[in-house]
Image (tube, helix red, strand yellow):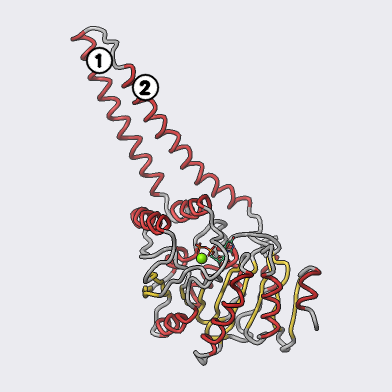
Amino acid sequence: MRNLHRNMQTPLSLSPVEVSVVIPVYNEEDGLQALFDRLYPALDAMATSYEVIFINDGSADRSPQMLAAQYHKRPDVTRVILFNGNFGQHMAILAGFEHTRGRIVITLDADLQNPPEEIPRLVEKMREGHDYVGTIRRQRNDTAFRRYASRAMNRLRERITKIRMTDQGCMLRAYDRNVIDTINACREVNTFIPALAYTFSSNPIEIEVGHEQRHAGESKYSLYQLIRLNFDLVTGFSIVPLQWFSAIGTLLSISSAGLFVVLLVRRFILGSEVQGVFTLFALTFFLMGIMLFGIGLLGEYVGRIYQEVRDRPRYRIQAVLERDLGANDGMRGNPGNDLETASCER
Ligand code: UDP
Ligand code: MG
């Protein structure tokens, strides 16, 4: 089951290119045309071989049709992977990775928050011999709350995991082929790609890039999803939280033992004391809070283990639009009627 989508993979050796650009797309119909208009000229200007891989992550709008149309416009450098459901940004990027052939692989958001014009700078750094180019947003154009929360989370993550990223949220990044191959060999379900890639890189570097406001549409991440993503980032890359928890448990046991001795001594010296009921309440609730937090934390890890042992395919590909080896436009899988009218004039 697991290798279902692998059968669709294009063997790397067949026609390698220098740069592969991977772009996940989820309900981006309002911004896609602007993306095409800026992305392709930026890549053409680099005068190197490249390919763009779009992954439609189960969009419910006209995004798949627009991607298919773009594929027909530039079949030489465009490939489109169509998911048959919404599996999330990181799963979409992973599927894209499995289809890349480039020596350098670049990820980019579809909403134009990452300017495509920055790609040549990333490629330049990779050519200098780095195997991972991370990015720092020069001036981040997100809401104040997101900037603040993201900075706090970043600091916590730096303490817990060994991953050093100044700006974890920016997806405009470049990875070397070897890093991508290692990521492709990983089968984990909930992951955070920039962090995963960082753990496999040997010569990483960070550069500053521009950041724009979303060109059109709204952020696809709700507050809840952002919290989940950050949990993935912490529990997916470290078991330090569990160790912290054991440490807190040990400290609390020692201090309650001390408190018990103090109370016992007071009982003999002062006789029975009935005051302090509310202090007792406060203490109990505090300890209960810590206990529940601990159970929740354990649950995070158990849940991850459960998802891993279940071993279900991480995503399902409905169709891949790509040029076949014989240079014919090709489509594999069943893209559905709607799309067929838009893209199948073969
Ligand atoms: N995205 C996706 N699947 C999802 C959510 C988002 O493929 O379930 C894509 C989305 O189309 C965009 C990128 O991931 O290209 C980043 O999403 P978004 O801009 O909404 O996130 P933000 O910039 O707010 O973090
Ligand atoms: Mg965005």
Amino acid bearing label 2: Phe
Q: Nearer the viewer, residue 222 or 207?
A: 222
Examine the image and state in which quarter residue 129 appears: bottom left
Relative to residue 92, is residue 242 drawn left or right? Answer: left
Task: Give the answer, above or below, for where 275 lies relative to 284.
Answer: above
Examine the image and state in which quarter residue 284 appears: top left
Relative to residue 337, is residue 80 drawn left or right? Answer: left
Task: Give the answer, above or below, for where 158 lies relative to 48.
Answer: above
**Residue ID for mark 1:** 264
Which structural element holds mark 1? helix
Quadrant in which the C terminus appears: bottom right
Count neighbours of disc 1 (C-alpha within 10 A) and say few if under 14, some if 14 to 19, many if 20 or more: few
**Residue, x 46% and y 51% (percent of image)?**
235
Residue 304: give x, y in percent of width and height.
Answer: 54, 49
**Residue, x 81% and y 69% (percent of image)?**
337
Task: Give the answer, above or below, for where 72 lies relative to 288.
Answer: below
Amino acid bearing label 1: Leu
**Of the two numbered discs 2 and 1 in the rendering, the one whose residue sits closer to the viewer:** 2
- Between disc 2 and disc 1, whose residue precedes? 1
Q: State the residue lying farthest toward the left.
A: 269
**Residue, x 36% and y 44% (percent of image)?**
244
Q: How many marks?
A: 2
Count neighbours of disc 2 (C-alpha within 10 A) and say few if under 14, some if 14 to 19, many if 20 or more: few
Q: Nearer the viewer, residue 83 or 163?
A: 83
Residue 170: give x, y in percent of width and height.
Answer: 45, 67
Task: Give the answer, above or below, for where 242 lies relative to 61.
Answer: above
Q: State the residue lying farthest toward the top.
A: 271
Which structural element holds mark 2? helix
**Residue ID for mark 2:** 281
Residue 291: give x, y in percent of width and height.
Answer: 42, 33
Quadrant in which the N terminus appears: bottom right
Residue 72: give x, y in percent of width and height.
Answer: 71, 83
